[in-house]
Amino acid sequence: MPRPTAAQLAYGSCTVLFSTLAMLLLSQTSSGAGIAVIAVSALLLGLLVAMTVPMPTKPRVVAVRRPADAQQEQAEESVLSQS
């Protein structure tokens, strides 16, 4: 299982923090069971957000031809064609 990236950790943590705060303020609950339900639902929401952040893709390796390489190839081709 790949490790979470910094972006995934940041998005998930912010989601948990702000959703917990919003749900507590909107519900105005003061019971322990209500706070526990809000905390668990905020953790699940944060996990969902963190897992839906796209993982970075591996960079593609692209071959770059330098002008010196092109000249050397031309010289080799001319030598081969003369033989």
Image (cartoon, helix red, strand yellow):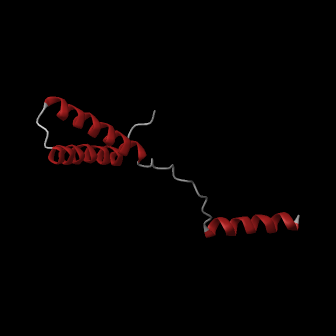
- The residue sitting at 23% across, 37% down in the picture is 38
**Which image quadrant for residue 20?**
top left
* Residue at the top extreme, as displayed: 33
Where does residue 36 sit, x and y in percent of width and height? 20, 31
**Which image quadrant for residue 12?**
top left
* Residue at the left extreme, as displayed: 30
- The residue sitting at 76% across, 64% down in the picture is 76
* Residue at the right extreme, as displayed: 83
Where does residue 23 sit, x and y in percent of width and height? 21, 45
Where does residue 57 sit, x and y in percent of width and height? 50, 50
User: Which of 41/73 is in front?
Assistant: 41
In the rendered view, does 81 fall on the left or right side of 52? right
Task: Note whether residue 33 is visible.
Answer: yes
Tell me if residue 35 comes above or below residue 18 in the rendering. Answer: above
In the rendered view, does 28 fall on the left or right side of 46? left
User: Which of 48/54 is in front?
Assistant: 48
Tell me if residue 79 comes above or below residue 8 in the rendering. Answer: below
Tell me if residue 64 comes above or below residue 15 in the rendering. Answer: below
User: Which of 3/8 is in front?
Assistant: 8
Task: Note whether residue 5 is visible.
Answer: no
For the C terminus, give its image quadrant. Answer: bottom right
Tell me if residue 76 comes above or below residue 14 in the rendering. Answer: below
User: Which of 57/33 is in front?
Assistant: 33
In the rendered view, does 24 fall on the left or right side of 72? left
- The residue sitting at 59% across, 58% down in the picture is 62
- The residue sitting at 17% across, 48% down in the picture is 26
For the image, the number of numbered tags is 0
